[in-house]
C-alpha cells in the first residue's frame, strides 16, 4: 500500500474529474433510454450522487476483491469486455434490469477471460458486478463509458496502482474521504462513519462468504453515507424527561412541581396531561398560582413517574416510528396524533375517567 | 331486467355507521378496566369495571373475595354498569386471576400508579 500511495494522488484528481461528470450526469441519464423504474428511485433520493456512491464503491470494492486475487492486468480487459458488453446490451435492449438476461450474457463473456479465480466465487462476483454496473451506468452513462475508458487507457501505463483507483479501492479510507469531500460535503454528519466503517472492513479483501452481520453493517454504513438524515434519526439520543418532582403538602396532598416543564418537553397541553393524571390515579386536584399541580392523595415520585410513562407511551410517542416528535390535535371531539418525523397520523383514545367509588363520608358528598 | 351481480352491495351494511355511535368513538368500550383509588391513610380501593356480560359478577366477586382474602362489593353504576369494588390494592392479583381464567391479557387494562 505504501508504495502505491504516491501513485494515488493523480488518481484522486481523476476521481474528482469523475465525480464532476458524475454529478452532472443525472440529466444525461434521464435523456438516455433506460428503464423507468430505476430512474424514479434515483430521483427520489435528493442527494442522488451520494446514493450512487454506495453501489459504485461496492462494485469497485467487489471488483478489487474478485480480480486482485487473480490478475490485475486482466482486469482492464475484463472491464473493457464488460463495458463493451454493456454498451451493446444497452443499444440492443431498452430494459437493462433484465436480470435473467444479464446472467445469461454476463457469465459467458466474463468467465472465459477470468481463468485464474475460483469459478463459483468469481462468477458470483462478476455477476453482481454487472448488475451493479448496469445500475450505475444508467445514472452516469456518459461518464462510465467514455471517461472510464479514457482513464483506463491512461492508466494502462501505470497498470496496477491506477487500476486500483479506477475500479478497485485498495485503500478505501482515502478514497472515501475524497468522496466525502466531493459529494457529501453539505451533509457533514454522515462523513465520519463512512470513512471509518465502510472503509475498514477487512473482510472485503478475503474470498470467504460474507456473514449476514457484516453485510448488514456495511449496508447501514453506506446507507448512512448516502442519507445522513436517516443517520441522525436512527442514532438519535434517547428521549429524556426530567423526573417529576413530588413533594407532600400537608398530610393528604401531593405537589407535582414541574408539570409545566414536563408538558413543555413533551409538547402537550398541561390540561391534557393533568386530565390523564387525574383519571389514571383516580383523584382530583388543582393547579396552584405557581403553576404547580396539587394532587389530592399521597403519591410518591415513582408512582407519578409510572403514570407519566404510560402517558408518553399512549399520547406522545409515535406508534409507528417510536419518535416522540408528535403533535396532538383535536378534531371533532377526537384527538389525533400526527408524527412529525414519519408523517403517520392516528387517533388516540379520549381520556375517560372510569368509575369513581364513593370515598369518605357520604354526608360531604352532595350527590350521595 | 336486473342482473344480480351488478347490484351494488355494501359489505358493511349490517355493521352500522362506525362513527355514528358517537359515544364509542375512540373509547375503551371492550376493555376491562382495573383501577385503584386512594382512601384515607394507606388504604386503597380497587375497582373492576367493564366485565363482559357473560360472566356472573356476583360469582366472580365471591371468588375474588375468597382468593384475595379481602372484602368487596358489587356497585351498580348508572353509566358504568356493574362494578366490582374490592378493598386494598388487588390490581395485579385481579389481572392474573382473570388471565388464568381465560380472559385475554390484551383486553385488560390496569390503571393507576
Image (cartoon, coloured by chain):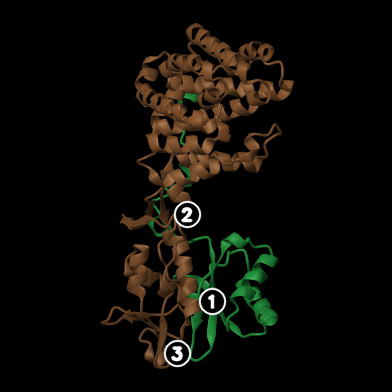
Chain colours: A brown, B green
Q: Residue at x 53, y 74 (%)?
A: B83
Q: Distance between the residues labelled 2 and 3?
A: 42 Å
Horizontal and vertical percent position of residue B15:
48, 46
Compared across the picture, whether B55 is left or right of A198 comes to: right
User: Between residues A291 and B52, which one lies in front from this camera angle?
Assistant: A291
The chain carrying label 2 is A
Residue A360 numbered mark, or none: 3
Q: Is B112 situated above or below A222?
A: below
The answer to whether residue A133 is visible is yes
Nearer to the camera, A346 or A123: A123
Residue A106 location, x and y as percent? 62, 14
User: Which label sits in the foreground, 2 or 1?
Assistant: 2
Badge 1 density bin: few <14, some 14–19, many ≥20, Cα 10 Å: many
Residue drawn at point x = 70 percent, y = 34 percent: A209
Residue at mark 2 shares a chain with residue at mark 1: no
Point out residue A275 in the picture as x, y percentages from the top left corner: 37, 71
* Subunit ID for the residue under disc 3: A
A82 lies above or below B95: above
Residue at image location 34% in from the left, 21% down from the top: A27
- Protein chain holding label 1: B
Instruction: Indicate the secondary structure of the residue bearing disc 3.
Output: loop
Quadrant showing the N terminus of chain B: top left
Give the residue at x 37% y 34%: A46
Residue for badge 2: A322
Residue A307 position within the rendered picture, expressed as x and y whole percent measured from the top left: 47, 72
Q: Is mark 2 on a helix, strand or loop?
A: loop
Q: Are marks 1 and 3 on the same chain?
A: no
Q: Earlier in the sequence, mark 2 or mark 3?
A: 2
Residue with the mark numbered 1: B47
- How dense is the environment of label 2, judged by Cα within 10 Å: few (below 14), some, or many (20 and up)? some
Question: For the residue labelled by badge 1, is the local secondary structure a helix, a strand or a loop?
Answer: strand
Amino acid at each position: 500500500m505504501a508504495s502505491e500511495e504516491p501513485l494515488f494522488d493523480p488518481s484522486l484528481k481523476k476521481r474528482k474529474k469523475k465525480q464532476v461528470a458524475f454529478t452532472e450526469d443525472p440529466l444525461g441519464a434521464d435523456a438516455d433510454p433506460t428503464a423507468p423504474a430505476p430512474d424514479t428511485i434515483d430521483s427520489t433520493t435528493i442527494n442522488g450522487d451520494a446514493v450512487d456512491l454506495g453501489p459504485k464503491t461496492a462494485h469497485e470494492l467487489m471488483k478489487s476483491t474478485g480480480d486482485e486475487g487473480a490478475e490485475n492486468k486482466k482486469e482492464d480487459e475484463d472491464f473493457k469486455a464488460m463495458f463493451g458488453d454493456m454498451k451493446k446490451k444497452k443499444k440492443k435492449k431498452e430494459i437493462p434490469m433484465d436480470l435473467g438476461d444479464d446472467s445469461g450474457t454476463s457469465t459467458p463473456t466474463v468467465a472465459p477471460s477470468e481463468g485464474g479465480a475460483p469459478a463459483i466465487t468469481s462468477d458470483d462476483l462478476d455477476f453482481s458486478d454487472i448488475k451493479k454496473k448496469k445500475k450505475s451506468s444508467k445514472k452516469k452513462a456518459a461518464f462510465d463509458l467514455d471517461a472510464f475508458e479514457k482513464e483506463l487507457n491512461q492508466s494502462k501505463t501505470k497498470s496496477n496502482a491506477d487500476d486500483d483507483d479506477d475500479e478497485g479501492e485498495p485503500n478505501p479510507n482515502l478514497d472515501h474521504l475524497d468522496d466525502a469531500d466531493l459529494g457529501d460535503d453539505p451533509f457533514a454528519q454522515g462523513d465520519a462513519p463512512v470513512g471509518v466503517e465502510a472503509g475498514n472492513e477487512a473482510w472485503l479483501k478475503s474470498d470467504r462468504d460474507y456473514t449476514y452481520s457484516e453485510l448488514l453493517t456495511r449496508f447501514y454504513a453506506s446507507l448512512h453515507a448516502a442519507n445522513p438524515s436517516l443517520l441522525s434519526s436512527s442514532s438519535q439520543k434517547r428521549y429524556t424527561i426530567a423526573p417529576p418532582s413530588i413533594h407532600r403538602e400537608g398530610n393528604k396532598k401531593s405537589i407535582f412541581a414541574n408539570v409545566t416543564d414536563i408538558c413543555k418537553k413533551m409538547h402537550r397541553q398541561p390540561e391534557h396531561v393533568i386530565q390523564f393524571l387525574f383519571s389514571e390515579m383516580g383523584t382530583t386536584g388543582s393547579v396552584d398560582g405557581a403553576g404547580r399541580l396539587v394532587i389530592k392523595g399521597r403519591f410518591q415520585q415513582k408512582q407519578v413517574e409510572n403514570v407519566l410513562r404510560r402517558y408518553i407511551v399512549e399520547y406522545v410517542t409515535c406508534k409507528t416510528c417510536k419518535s416522540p416528535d408528535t403533535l396532538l390535535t383535536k378534531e371533532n371531539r377526537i384527538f389525533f396524533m400526527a408524527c412529525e418525523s414519519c408523517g403517520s397520523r392516528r387517533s388516540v383514545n379520549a381520556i375517560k375517567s372510569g368509575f369513581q367509588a364513593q370515598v369518605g363520608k357520604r354526608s360531604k358528598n352532595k350527590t350521595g | 331486467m336486473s342482473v344480480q351481480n351488478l347490484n351494488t352491495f355494501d359489505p358493511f351494511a349490517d355493521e352500522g355507521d362506525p362513527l355514528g355511535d358517537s359515544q364509542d368513538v375512540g373509547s375503551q368500550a371492550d376493555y376491562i378496566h382495573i383501577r385503584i383509588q386512594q382512601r384515607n391513610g394507606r388504604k386503597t380501593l380497587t375497582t373492576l369495571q367493564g366485565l363482559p356480560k357473560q360472566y356472573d359478577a356476583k360469582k366472580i366477586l365471591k371468588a375474588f373475595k375468597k382468593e384475595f382474602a379481602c372484602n368487596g362489593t358489587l356497585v351498580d353504576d348508572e353509566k358504568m354498569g356493574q362494578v366490582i369494588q374490592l378493598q386494598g390494592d388487588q390490581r395485579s392479583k385481579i389481572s392474573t386471576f382473570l388471565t388464568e381464567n381465560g380472559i385475554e391479557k390484551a383486553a385488560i387494562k390496569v390503571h393507576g400508579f
